[in-house]
Amino acid sequence: MKKIRLTLEDIKVKVAEFYDAKVWHFITLNALLIENDKIEIQWMFSKYESLEDIVVYYVEVERDIEIPSIEEIVPSATISQREIVDMFGIKIENSEKGLYLDKDSIEMPLGCAI
Amino acid sequence: MSKKIIQIPLGSQHIALLEPVKFNFKCENEKIVHVDSDVGFVHRGIEKACTTRYKYDAVGYVVARICGLCAITHSLSYTVAIEQLLDAKITEKAKYLRILLLELDRIHSHMLCLSHTCENAGFEAMFMRIMGDREMIMEIQELLTGNRVQFDFISIGGVNRDLSPAHAKVILEKLKLLRVKVLEYVDEFNNNWSLSLKFKGIGQMSLDDAYKFNAIGPLARASGLKLDVRNEIEYLPYKEIGYVMQTELNGDIDARNRVRLNEILNSIEMCENVIEGLPEGEIFTKAKGKPKGESIVRFEAPRGELAYYIKGSGKPMLERVRIKTPTFASVPAFSHIFLGESYADAAAILASFDPCLSCTAK
C-alpha cells in the first residue's frame, strides 16, 4: 500500500491527474479518528490486473471542515461519501445525510468515542 | 401516447426481494427515467462493534456473521489483514483449505442467484431444481466446518479443521455429480427461451460504463471488464489450482448468468484440484503479538471485491475496521443500469445483480 498525503485544496486536482478509469479501480472512501480530535479521510485505489498495487490518498482535517467531493471524477464515490457523512458526522460536498441514519438515530456513530 | 411521469417504488418489501432495499423509479410510461435508492433499513453497526466490543482475535468470528452467503470471505479478509500486521506465516495446506471454502461459498451463492433468476423468469421448476442441487454444497460445507452456514472455519494463523480422507472422498463424489447438474443448467440457460432470449439485451451495461461506475464481480466481468481480485492477490495460490477468469461481452442479464455458470464450473475444478493436490503439513501456526499499523486486504466475494482496512495500535482493541462490501459499492452502477429499461424488467434486472443487503447493512 502506497500512502500519499494531500491537502484539502489539492484533492480534486491530484485525484483528477492520477485517476484514469481504465487503469485505476476506486475501492472505497474511508475515514478514521486520529489524534487531536482530527479525522483522516482516505481515498483508496487499486490498479487493474496488477498484483497488490494499492494507492491511498489521504488528508488529515478538523471535523467541521467540508471535504471536497470527487464524484465528478469518480461517479461511484457518491455512495461511500454519503456513508462516511452519516457514520462520522462530517461534511462532504454534495453529500447529504440520511443514507443509513434516520432522524432519531444516534448521531455520527463512528465519529464518537462511545 | 402522452408522456406522463409516474413514480413506482420497488421495495422495501417486494415479492422479488429477499432483503430490504428500496428503489424509487420515476417512469415515463413504462420506461425508467430516474432511480433513487435507499439501503439503510437494517444497519447493524458491525464496524463499530469491531472496535468497541470485541478484541481483535474475536473480530474474525463477528465479521463472519455479516453475511450468510459469503461468511468465509468476510472472516478470511479480516484474518489475512490481521496476519499481515502480525507478519504471520501460513502453511500451504491452510491456504489450500481456505481456497476450498472460498470457492464453495462462490458455488452456492451463484446457484442461489441463478435460481432466483429462474424464479423471476417464471420458471419455478428450475428454481426448485437448482435450490435442491445446492444442498450438495451445503452438505459439503457441513462436512468441512460442522455448519451449513455461518462457519467458524478461518482463524488467525490457519484454519480450524483438517480434511479427512473419508470426507475428501465424499466431497469429490458430490462435486462430480454437481458438475453434471451444472452442465445441464448451461444447456437450459442456452436453449430455454425463458432463460436465454428473454434476458438478452435486458439490463445491459457497456464496458465503458463498467469502468466509469467501478463495476465489480460478475456484473463487471459480464461487460468484459477484467476485474477479479483472485487475479490480483498473492495471499492465496489461485494460479496453482486452475483459476481462470470468466468474462462475457454483452453486459446483459444473459451475460451475467453465463459468467456465473462458468465460474461455478471453474470453482468445481479448483475445489477438486485443491483436494487432490492438498499439501501435507499443519493447518495452523500460532501468530504472536498484537496488530500494529495499517493494512488493506481484498478478496473476491461471490458478488465482487470485498475489502477490509484495519488499523491497530499494538493493543487488543483495534482502532478502525472499515469494510467495503460489493453490493453497497455497486449501488451507483445498479442505478445507472436501470435507466432506460422497462419497469416490467426491473425485478429481473435487480435479481441479476445478486444484491446482498446483509453485507450492505453491515
Image (cartoon, helix red, strand yellow):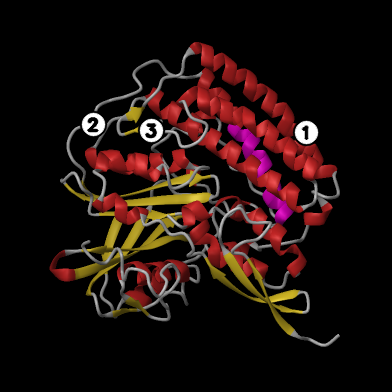
Residue bounds of the magenta highlight:
B252-267
**Residue B313 in magenta stretch:** no
Q: Is residue A27 left or right of residue B274?
A: left
- What element does badge 1 sit on? helix
Q: For residue B184, which numbered disc appears in the image?
A: 1
Residue B131: x and y, percent? 68, 37
Whether the magenta-drawn stretch holds residue B253 is answered as: yes
Magenta segment's dominant SS is: helix
The answer to whether any part of residue B283 appears in the image is yes
Query: Residue A70, located in which quarter of the rendered image?
Result: bottom left
Near mark 3 (Cα within 10 A), the count class, few <14, some 14-19 or many ≥20, is: many
Instruction: Pick out the residue farthest to the front.
Output: A104
* Image coords of residue A33 (percent x, y): 22, 64
Task: Using residue A64 as the reference point, say whether residue B186 is left or right of it.
Answer: right
Q: Quadrant of the C terminus of chain B?
A: bottom left
What residue do we see at 24% from left, 27% from top? B286
Farthest residue in the left direction?
A36
Q: Name the residue located 43 percent from the left edge and 81 percent from the top edge.
A: A94
- Give the CA separation, mark 2 to mark 1: 45 Å
Which is more N-terminal, label 3 or label 2?
A: 3
